[in-house]
Every structure is written in structure tokens, then in C-alpha cells.
Image: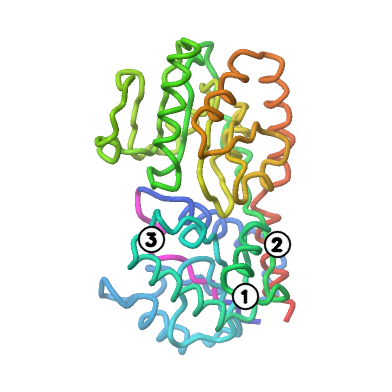
Amino acid sequence: MKIGIQISPDLDKKNKTGIENYLENFRNQIMMLKKLKKHQIFLYTRKTVKWPFKFGWTQIGLSLKILQDKPDILFVPAHTFPIVHPKLVIAIQGLEFEAIPKNYSFFQRKILRFLTKRNLKNAEKIIVPSECTKRDLIKFYKADPRKIFVVYHGINTESTRNYTPNQYRKYILYLGSGHKRKNIKGLIKAFEILKNKHKIPHKLILAGVSKKDNEEQNIKYKNEIFFTDYIDEHKKWELLKNAEVFVFPSFYEGFGMPPLEAQLAGVPVVASNTSSLPEILEKSALLINPSKPEEIAEGIYKIISNPDLKESLIKKGYKNVKRFNWEKCVKETLDIIFNK
């Protein structure tokens, strides 16, 4: 069988987001599977599809390449598919724009809805990273549940090998983008509550968040809050390994990789009780209402002030991350693709 896999043209960009990391891990893992020797695999990237223009890579350039290769099935892990295509298996990573529409512009919602409807209409099978995303597709689009398959993302268990925590763990860490749905404002308010009520000595590090996106906010303890903008992999694991608490108060996640990375690094997690996070974290983290900064603050303080709770969450976190690995993710995805 000929299988085409469409890798986003953004894969080689320097500042990778969750989607690019997913695609990169998927690409790296798929070539290691022995079962693929029975099949012909086409990985479609900017390098393999030689399209000279900035626009039209997916719709035109990839269409021409597909006419040449004639794959039996095209797997689209993210974004949209080309005009010319064989049978389609498409992954939809989340429906943030439907769950919290106020965080997206009218134009963004229109485009994302159009693409989602197009994907659902044309794909024979839809792969999603959580039961939450499956429920949302059924809720918002009346999607056929029989064509939706849940496949959890993986996590690189080797990532922390070269990083050793030091004895100074007096900071609270968030890792992710500064998008409105990530609830950075709520986290900053929670930090102010911790400073005012409990007089904690900790700093707050917002890794991946730009300070300029929060300049309009009146931050009381601005000298104790650090915005890092984008950070590379080395810096990411260094920060994770040395944090005392990891906080992820996002309003919506289709999957939610950062809390799992924190657990892999041996850091207790406070996370939202919304969307996919209760499913991904189960009872291995303290779950809070992201709309209540007081509740976020109390969750953090419970860990800081209770060594036994902290150690318990660390142990549960190590156990939880064992449920997720990229080899399993890719094998389950391929089983769905191959089983007509």
C-alpha cells in the first residue's frame, strides 16, 4: 500500500509550537517501525514537494506531487488537505475556537469552522488526541462518532536524562504560549494572591510568554515575574527540572503536553479541571477551576506548604506519563490508517 503523510511546511521553523513538535515526533518515529517495510511511505514536506512560491504549497504544490506518486491514502496530521487527494485520514487536534470563541476574532472563527467542516466532510476517518476533542466534534458539528478515533500523543521519556535539578527550587513555572486561552492573566492574579496572603518567597516564570502581550495588565509584583519569550529545548528542560511547582491554568486544551513534560521532569502539577486535562492527568495533579485565581493560588500553596502532598504528586506524575509514548501513538495511528 502507498501511504502519503502530509507534514506541515512549518516543521523546520525555529520557534516550534505543540503542533510542530507533534509532527516532528511523528515523522521521527514512523521511519523506525519495521511494519512499514511492507508499504511505500511518502513524507510530504517543503523539501520533498519542491514548490517555489510562498503560498499554494498545500493546495497546488502537494496536489501535483500526489498526482505523480498516486498514494492510496493521505494522512493529514494537522491543518488542511490538498485539492487533489486520495482517501483521507485527518487529525483534528482541538476545538479551542468553539469552546472559548471570545478568545478568537470573527475572521479566525470563520476560517477554522470552514476548515473543520471541510475536514469532517471529506475524511473517511478522523483522529483526535483526546476523548474531549471527540465529544466536542460531536457537540459542535454533529460528527459521526463511528469515524472518530482517539489516539493520545506521546512524550519523549529520554528528554530529561541530561538535566539534574539543583537545590534551589524557589520558583513557580508556567510553560506554553501567551494566547488568551492559556489564562496568563489569571495566573498572575493567583501569584499576587500568594504573595499577599501567604508571603511566599517564590518567583513566577512564564516560559514562552512575551512581556509585551501583558503590558496592559497592572502587575503588582512585576519584579518577581519573568517573561522568557520563546525558549529552546535545553532551556525548557532546565527550567522544568528546577521548578518547585508547575502551573497550567488553561481554559481549553485538545491534549496538553506541558503538564506531562513537567511530570516527566519530577515536578508536581496544578492544572485546570476543564477540557482534556482531567482525562490526560487523571488523579496525578491538583485540578483547579481556571476561572478562579483564588483556587489556582490555593492549589499552588497546598503543594508548597505540604511536602508529603508534593512527593505524592511527583510519584503519581511519573506513573501517569508512562501511559504516553510516541511509538504507541504512531502504531495506533497506522492501524487506523491501514484498516479500511
Question: Considering only vertical position in the picture, is 198 above or below 47?
Answer: above
Circle 2 crowding by C-alpha within 10 Å: few under 14, some 14–19, many from 20: some
Is 8 inside the magenta-drawn segment? Answer: yes
Q: Which residue is mark 3?
A: 10
Q: Amino acid at mark 1?
A: Lys
**Residue 148: image location, x then y, percent:** 67, 71
Task: Report x, y in % for residue 221.
Answer: 33, 19
Observer-side mark, 3 or 1, equals: 1
Label 1 neighbour load within 10 Å: few <14, some 14-19, many 20+: few
Observer-nearest of 43 and 247: 247
* Residues marked 3 and 2 touching at CB (< 8 Å): no
Which of the two residues, 35 or 208, is positioned nearer the viewer here? 208
Three-letter residue code for mark 2: Lys
Indicate the secondary structure of the residue bearing disc 3: loop
Q: Does label 3 or label 1 sit earlier along the sequence?
A: 3
Pinpoint residue 330: horizontal percent, then vertical percent. 65, 60
Q: Which residues are magenta?
A: 4-14
Q: Earlier in the sequence, mark 1 or mark 2?
A: 1
Q: Which residue is mark 2?
A: 331
The residue that appears at 44% across and 76% down in the rendered structure is 114
How many C-alpha atoms fall within 10 Å of the one at disc 3: few (<14), some, or many (≥20)?
some
Q: Which residue is mark 1?
A: 142
| Real-space Cα separation, disc 3 to disc 1, in angstroms | 31 Å
User: Circle 2 — which element?
Assistant: helix
Marks counted in the figure total: 3
Q: Earlier in the sequence, mark 3 or mark 2?
A: 3
User: In the rendered view, does 134 fall on the left or right side of 214?
Assistant: right
